[in-house]
Every structure is written in structure tokens, then in C-alpha cells.
Image (tube, helix red, strand yellow):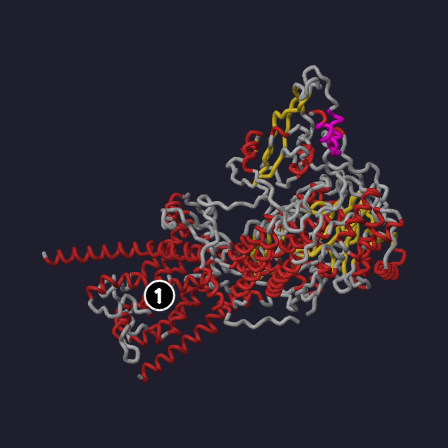
Amino acid sequence: MSVDFAVDRQAWRHLADAQVNVELDTGDMILNLGPQHPATHGTLRLVVRLDGERVVSADPVIGYMHRGYEKLTEFRTYPQVTTLINRIDWLSSFANEVPFMHGAELLMGIEAPPRAQYIRTILTELSRIATFMLFLGEMGLQVGALTPPFYGFRDREHVLNLIEAATGGRFHPNFNRIGGLKDDLPWGWVNECRNTMKVVFDACNILEELVAENEIFGARTRSIGIIPPEVGTGYGVSGSNLRASGVDWDLRRDGKPYLVYPELDFKVWTHPDGDSYARYWVRLQETREAARMVVQMLDRIPTGPIMAKVPRIIKVPEGEVWVETENPLGQMAYYVISKGATGPFRVKIRSASFSNVSILPWLLRGVYVPDVITILGSLYFILGDIDR
Amino acid sequence: MPKLPKPKAPGLIGGLGVTFKTMLKGAVTVQYPHEREDPPTRARGVIALKEENCTVCMLCARQCPDWCIYIEGHKEKRPPRREGGRERTVSLLDRFDIDYALCMYCGICVEVCPFDALFWSPEYEYSESNIADLLHDKEKLGEWMETVPEPEPLEVGAETGKK
Amino acid sequence: MTELALDVGWGTILAIKTVVVLAIIPLGAIILGYTFLLKMMAHMQSRLGPMDPGGFHGWFQLFGDGIKFIQKEDVMPAKSDRRIFAIAPAVVVISTFLVFLVLPTGPDLVVSDLDVGVFYALAVSSLSVVGVLMAGWASANKFALLGALRAAAQLIAYELPLLLAVVGVVVMAGTMSLQGIVEQQQNGAIFGWDGIGNPFVFAQIIGFVLFLVAAQAELTQTPFDMPVAESELVAGYMVEYTGFRFLFFFIGEFGTAFAFAALAATLFLGGWAIPFVTDPGWSNVLGPIVLITKIMLVAFLMFWVRFTYPRLREDQLQAVAWKFLIPIGLANILITGALKVAF
Amino acid sequence: MADDLEREPAADAAQEDAVAEEVSVEQQLAETDEPAAAEQARADADEADAPPTEEQAAGESRPLDETEQELLARLERELGDGIVESADAFGMLVVRVKPDAWRRAAEVSKRELECDYLSFIAGIDWQPAPREGEEAGGDTSSPVQPTEMTFGVAGSVGRLQVFAHVESTKRRWGVTLKTDVDERDPRAESWVTTYPGADWHERECWEMFGVAFDGHPSLRHLYLPSEFEGHPLRKDYPLLARVVKPWPGLVDVEPMPGEEQPADAAASAEADKGDGADADKEESS
């Protein structure tokens, strides 16, 4: 497949027009998908120029949820920042906290104790399961099946209960502290977790049977929204979306070692097709893989403290650090610049969905309206993760 | 190259089977106003205030990332505890409001409180139809103290006995 | 004098029939809506559905919804074609209403037993596409327009397989009168065994499946619900409707489902006919109950599919119709005809 | 290669905490990954110097490891004197290039370093933004940054910089590139032709920092409404939420009648440092 990287200037002019949303006498129809539209799960607006039902050009308009986190972090101390970054990707909040905490710990020269590292990894994988579980159900809804999302929600609930039992918050755990964790696990949590992983495996099987193996679902998703690997990387598409294009790149394995991933035995799933079906399939396998990893880790949690020795007032020494992790949605990274104060000087939040969605204008050209929804669904973005 | 597993039955039939089986099973939902789910002990539902422990040190109000805690206080003289001791000055609360419309439920205030005056309670039924009514005063926060659970035991392998 | 009395009698009977048929549509819609939309779907999704309204398992929910809809403000979009916008829901409901005129629920319980009953029923049922187009056009909304255009394309495409599926039955029965088809099924025999008569579902299993698939498309139900497609077109042609006009569409949707289920039950499951009961008196009493049972059975199949499957794309839907259903339907007629001649 | 990278942070941790002799011991312990031993090592480190102080500025003087050296060598081969400075920041190579080599740096990274993956492009405003006195409204909760302008890893000539991170999905390495931007006429070369994903990142950088990108096809607002004025992420742009509302952390304890204000200001300043709690305790007991 040949790929043109050069920007189509003509298309850009169209997009600029579409932005103003003035109907010009071109014979095309401009359709506003969103900001309030059931398919965009959040306030993403998609200005689509249609020729019949075929998309001529599409321009995502984002920013309806922009909360200015990069600015806000400059006015917060390090412990206060955790509360904010929880809300970037609100479906996997715990996973958002980890890289930031890791960055601050690197700057301070602290290392969390092994038990804390294990619990962090378990909770990160749990939030990955929770996120993907929702996706696996919701993707069904995007292509019109009413029932799968309920199964997704139903079984995700078990995982959320686990997270809540350990951290106190279903969605916003705020459980990480610089140097460790707020608390240890409650009594009986490990057993509970083990049982829940069985539920997760069952749920994956159910959703596979109900959605992935359905011929209609296959017809709707196969060879729809193909992202060639070189285009995907150029746009900064990451995570499962990139692995579904056959790029064997997972920061848990390939990045700088963080948490306890180097000690774990896991497989990085890829799919050669790069279409919507491949993205669904990869996430399905990664959910199972995550559950397997959790089971592995539950047997190995070491004993010991959960908090390293940390000064009472957290002042982070001057320096810059770049910490990237493999979050459920893709590469989540923070570029933390500290000047020795109690709060960061500048934090560049590199969120996965932002780049994942930036490929939409390229990807949506020439598809049908129903496929727009399929592609949006299969890219799987969280609005908070786009707008930050 | 991963090969997709061959489906056992046609996917269309299998899907029908899944929904039919689920239909025969019971529901998993909770009929909320009639029955309630118990949140776990640690659930961060609402912040309760033990007024007698508060010394108006303002730490919580300062550390709050949202600036949603409002405190006012005054000082009073109290007779000495021991015979012949010095007269004590105590700080008493006049006002302790938390604006739950702003609160992000991060728990920083509970953690920084040096005198254990703030606690998390799993209570969750305090919604209001008017956003201004979410500003709760110290009497209301004090009522929630009853719902604060005992801390639960920790998992095997946890280090007990805090330093 | 007697003539006059007869006239009055005839008029009264017609009035009663009309009222009954008029009542069947919302009643059928509510029965289907409650049983399947609210309850069956809920249980398939591990939920309970509404439990409070009316006390027992929320049976009053849809009545309550209806009352709520009637109370709502009648909103019309500023740029809409107001008259057409107002008429459209009625057109949809009327087309459903007309179907019930020829549906027999007992040996004598039929408004009008037309000789071309099947033909008539299918013809009027496809009138609803006019209403849908009117609604989509008059709403002055892009989503509604897209939905209406999709609906038109789809309903027209699926008329054909629907018709072809029925032709097999007509060939077997040798009549187009619905009453005649029911009687044929009651009096027939399967290879000489007349225990349960000869419901055409056995001989015409292909036709039955074809009919259900095509009916699914006619009803714009998943997997053929692109015209409403809530995840892409929000609600398609209904997107601008509120209040009692939306209620009309709702009644139309489930009333039509009831009508198609009734047609399927009549054509393939023997309608009101009950095995072992040949007495017309008893048949008149039990007929409606039996028919309702069979309707529920068919409706269960239709809604089961609706709540399980994802939806196809518009071009795939056309492909299914023209590449699969129509050839299969034609082959079915051919085989049926050949067998009919042979035996 | 992963091993090289792995060792780096551990070494950093050691370097921060202890004197030279202890480094090797701690490093060994950290690598053996034995909880008890690690705990012991940490305790030792804590005794030595628990809170790392500002003097131990991180990153600057660390030598480059093999991967980084190779990356730098490849960059130097192509860019020549386009490279101004390079440094290591916790195992990541940071290279500052001249503004006119910015686009070439992207092309070289893509071609020679095989960095096919664009992680982000963003801006930095190095101008200090201390909030004190009147401006802060008494707020001592927000972190107070140093008042003099200092530049981070790899330095800068002026206040504004653009930086980007690219990675290789095949070789699994990455590099951060920085370039200086003139404050009076902030512009940089666009990367869109090399990395199509740069489009949105540059739009974001343009609206947040006011840095124009030459060659970008359409610099439009990304997050903010099109009539928005100002560049919110610049340090001189106030965060209105913190300006409009009075800080609720101001001590509002009425003193005893006839008593002088009992050093409230001092108490509050101390309380903020965490010692205030003890002070209050003494007061009340």
C-alpha cells in the first residue's frame, strides 16, 4: 500500500471551511457529528463533509473538555497533582498516576518498595482490564448491538469493586504517593482478586462469542479503517491501536523498565491487519493477557513496607525527566521539569488519545458514515485524554 | 502471524445462545431505593468532621487543591488541666464548611490532618437538587461521624504497626 | 323494518370491529413493548427493567410513558414543513391499522376477509415508508433526512423478499385469502398425519426464515436498523419528534411489529387454528388467545435477534437482499411449485 | 540495550543519596532486588541524608551511556554544528539544535535514528512566574518557583523553547530534541512533512505558547475558541481561578480579646511547612 505523507492542501481548505460550518454551494453536505452525539462518547465534534453517505473530509473539533491541566499543574504541589492527573483518562485513572509518580520518584532519587511496586502493577493491570472491558462491550453498541455494552459494564463492575476496595475510589483512586502507596491492601483482597479474574476470563469468552465471532460484526469491522503501520507511527498512534497494525511495540516490555513488568511473563499481542476488527481482537487478547498477569502477580506479592522513606515536605530537586508507560489507551507520558520547588515547573502531559485521534482526518477520508462510527469506536479514545 | 481461532458454531447462533442463557440467569442489578449496596470500608463517600479534635490549624484548607474548605475559628481561655498549671488557650471552630460541589474527593485533607479530626465515610446519599446546598457546615459534617467505619484489617504480608 | 334493523346491526358490528382494531394497535404495541423491549431485553442484559410503576414488575410503565408523552409540549422545528411534519406519524400508524383489517382471529372474527388478503396486507404495510419519508424530509434535519433515505431504500429492497417468501405459502394454500390460508393449514395433513393440521412452517421453513428476515428489515429492527441507528443517526427520521407525535411513532413501531408477527403467525403457524378444535364456536372464543400466543412466539424470535445482533451497513443490507434473500426466495418458489405439481 | 537503560535510574538513585563509597554498595543491593537488603540500603541512605536538597541538581553532569552516545553520533554526523548542546536526563538523550536545523533534525531522526514514532511536540516557557504578596492574595499553597530564570537540561538562549520527543518502534530508543525560539518573533520550522502527527501538536503549541510554525498548513485554534486571545501556557498568563477567589487557607482565628495577634503570620508560614501542626498543638495543650 502506498501512503502519501504530503498534506493535501486542497483538503485543508475544505476543512477550514467546514470549521466555520458555513454551507457553501458545493453540493456536499456538512454533517456535524457531535459535540452531543451518542457515538462520540464525550464531547468530540466531528465536522464531516459528505457526498451522499461517503465522507469527503472530516475534521475533528476538540477542546470542549479542555481543562488546562498543563497550566493547573504549575499551580499545584506534587501530591496535589495526582488528583488532577487521575482525571485525564478517567477510565484508567490509576494507570495515569503511575508514570507521574515514577517521574517524581526518579527526580527525587527514591524508589518505591517492592510490595508497593507489585500492588501498583496489579492495580494498573486491573484498570487496563476495566478500560478494555468497557471497550469490548461498547464496541458492540457502536455497530448497533444493544446487549454487549451491558455485559461489559456488568463484568467491569467486579473489577471496579476491587479497585474501590483497595483504594477507596472507583474511578479516581488517588492511591499513589511519591515513594509508595497510601495504604496496604485490605484483608481478603488477594482472594477476591483471584476470583474476579475468573469472571474476567468468562466475560472475555462471552464477549468474544457475542461480538467478535458474530459475522455481522466481522462484516462491519473487517478492512474498515486500516491504519498502515508507517502512517500510524507518523501520527503518533500508540498502544493497542498500533499493535493492531502489526507494530510489535509495547512499552511494558520495550520501554525503560518500570514497575515489575520485567519480572513478568507476558505476551505482546499484535495483529497484521490494522483494521477495526484487529483493534477489537488485540484488545480482547490484551484483556486476557492482563488478567493472566494479575494472576501471576498475586502469587508473588512480596511482604514488606509499602512506603519508602520520604521527607514530609516534598520538594523535588531540579531536573527534567521523561517517563512513558503503556497505558490502556496507549503511550502515556509526562515530561516533568522541576526547579526544586514543591510543585513542578512545567509538566508536558503526553496523552495517548490525543495522538490516536489526530489520525482521524487521514483515516476518515472516503469511508461511509456508519464506518465513521465504527472507526471512532475502534480507536477508543477518552475525551479527557484528548483534551486534558 | 496470529491466526484467528475457527468459530465453533456460526457466530450468529452463538450470540443468540449467549443472550438466551443470560436471560435465564438472574439479574445483577440492585433495586436501589429498596435495597442498597454496601460500599467497601475504604470508600471515599463523604468527609466527616470530629469537631472536638479540630484545632483550627488550617492545614486541610491550605492543602486542599480545590480550595473548597472554609474555616473560621476563635480562641478561648480554659482553666488549667492540673492544679496550679498554666491557663490554656484553645482554638475553637466557628465555621467548618466543605463545598462538595467543588470537592474532588482526593482525600488530601484527611491525610494531612494532624489531629485526626477528618475521616472518610462511605456514606453516599447526600445529593441535593440545588448546587448551593452542597456546601455543608460542621454540624452536617459532624453527623456523618456516626457512619465512619472502623478501619479494616490489612492483607497478609502487609507491614503492620505504623512507624 | 327488518332491513333497517339489519342495517343498524351491520353498522354496529362494523363500529365494534373498528373500535377493536383501533384498540389492537396500541394494545399490541404495549404488550410487545412491555414484554420484549422492557422485560426481555432487560433480562438478556442482566437487568430487571422497570419494577416500580403499577406495582407488579412495572406493568404500568408504558402507560405512564404514554401519559407523559401526551402531556409534553408539541415542538416543531422552525424550518420544518409543518403540515407534513404533523401528518407523517399518522401515516405510519394508519398503514399498520389497515393490516389488521384482514387479519382473522377466528372463523368469524375478521373485519373483512378479502380474496386478496395477503396481497392487500403486504401492500398497505409498505405504506409506512411514505410516512417515514415524509417525517425525514419535513424535519429539516440532516440526520432525519439520511435516516429517511436509508429507510426508503431499505423498505423498498425488502418488499421483494417478503413477497417471495409469502408466494410459497400462497402456492401451497392455493388462495390469497388469509382466512383460506388458515383453514388450509388447519385441515391439511403432514404426510397423511393430521394431528396438528399442516402449519406451513414445516413445509415452508425457508419461506418462514425469509419472511422473518425481511420483516426485520421492514420493521427497521436490528440488524437492519440503519434508518434509526441511534449510534450514528441518533434516531434517524424520528430525531425531531417529541411528545405525542413521537408516541405515534412508538406505537407505529411496535404496532407494526405486532402486525408482522400476526401475519407470520397466520401464514406459517396456522393463525387462530387450534389442533383438535374444529367447532367454530370454540374456535371463535379460543382463536384470539391462540393467535396471541403464536404472535408472541414469533415476536420473541424477532426481538431476540434484535437485542443480540449488531447492525449491518446500508450497502451490506442491500447486498443481503439482492444476493441472498431474493435468489433463495425464487428458488423456494420454484421448489414449492414443483412439489405442488408433483404431489 | 534494555539492561543499559535499566541500570541508569538505579545509579541515579544511588548518586543522589550517598557518598561515593556507598554508591557501589547500594547499586549492588538494588540490583540483587532483595527486599530486606534494599530496605537496609534505603535506611542507610536515609540516615545519610533523607531529603535530597536542591544543590544536587539532577541530570546535568551525568555521562551518556552507550545507546545515547550512538544516537548522538548519528545525529552529529548528519547535523554537524546544528547541534548546540546535548545532555542526559535519566537515561534519555536531550539534544538542543539550532533553530534553522529544527526541521532537518526531524528528518535525520526519522532517517538515521529510525525514529518513526512522534510522541509529542510542545513548548516551554522558562520565564519564572513567582506568585508572591499581593498577586498571590496570601496564597502560600501554590508552589513558589525560583525567581531567577534558569534553563533545564541542555540549556536555552531565551525564554521560549520548543521541544519534541521521537521514538523508534523498531530500535526501541528515543530522543528529545529542543530548539530555541526567539521571544519577540516566536517561530519554528514545522515538522508536518516529516511526521504528519505534528499537525495537532504544533497547533496546540501555537495557541498555548504563540509559537508559529513555518510550513504548517493551517495554524488554527485547537482547544480554544477561535476568538480567544493570549497564550495560556506562557508563564505571564495568569490562572484566573487562583486570582479571582480569595485563598481559604488564610488564618481566620479571632484572637483573644485584648490579646495581641499571636504571631498568626509566622504560624501560618510554619504551618505550611508542616511544622505548624506542632506549634498549634503546643498552643492548645
Residue A83 figure quarter: top right
- Whether residue D170 is situated above or below residue B79 in the rendered picture: below
**Residue C235 coordinates in the image, percent (x, y):** 48, 54
Q: Quadrant of the C terminus of chain C?
A: bottom left
Residue at the outermost top position: D258
Q: Is residue D265 magenta?
A: yes
Q: Nearer the viewer, residue C5 or D82?
A: D82
Residue D254 can be seen in this image:
no
Q: Nearer the viewer, residue C176 or C145?
A: C176
- The overriding secondary structure of the stretch rendered in magenta is helix
**Residue A104 coordinates in the image, percent (x, y):** 75, 47
**Residue D188 coordinates in the image, percent (x, y):** 79, 51
Question: How many marks on residues?
Answer: 1
Identity of the residue drawn at 43% across and 66% down: C156
Residue B4 figure quarter: bottom right
Q: Residues within 10 Å of mark 1 (few under 14, many from 20)?
A: some
Report the side of D6 relative to C53 (left or right): right
Residue at the outermost front position: B83
**Which chain is mark 1 on?**
C
Residue A207 can be seen in this image:
yes
Q: Which residues are magenta?
A: D264-281
Q: Is residue A127 magenta?
A: no
Q: Quadrant of the N terminus of chain C?
A: bottom left
Three-letter code for the amino acid on which mark 1 is drawn: Ala
Residue topped by disc 1:
C123
- Whether residue C212 is situated above or below residue D81 in the rendered picture: below
- Whether residue C127 is situated above or below residue C54 in the rendered picture: below
**Residue A50 coordinates in the image, percent (x, y):** 57, 59
Identity of the residue drawn at 80% across and 60% down: D3
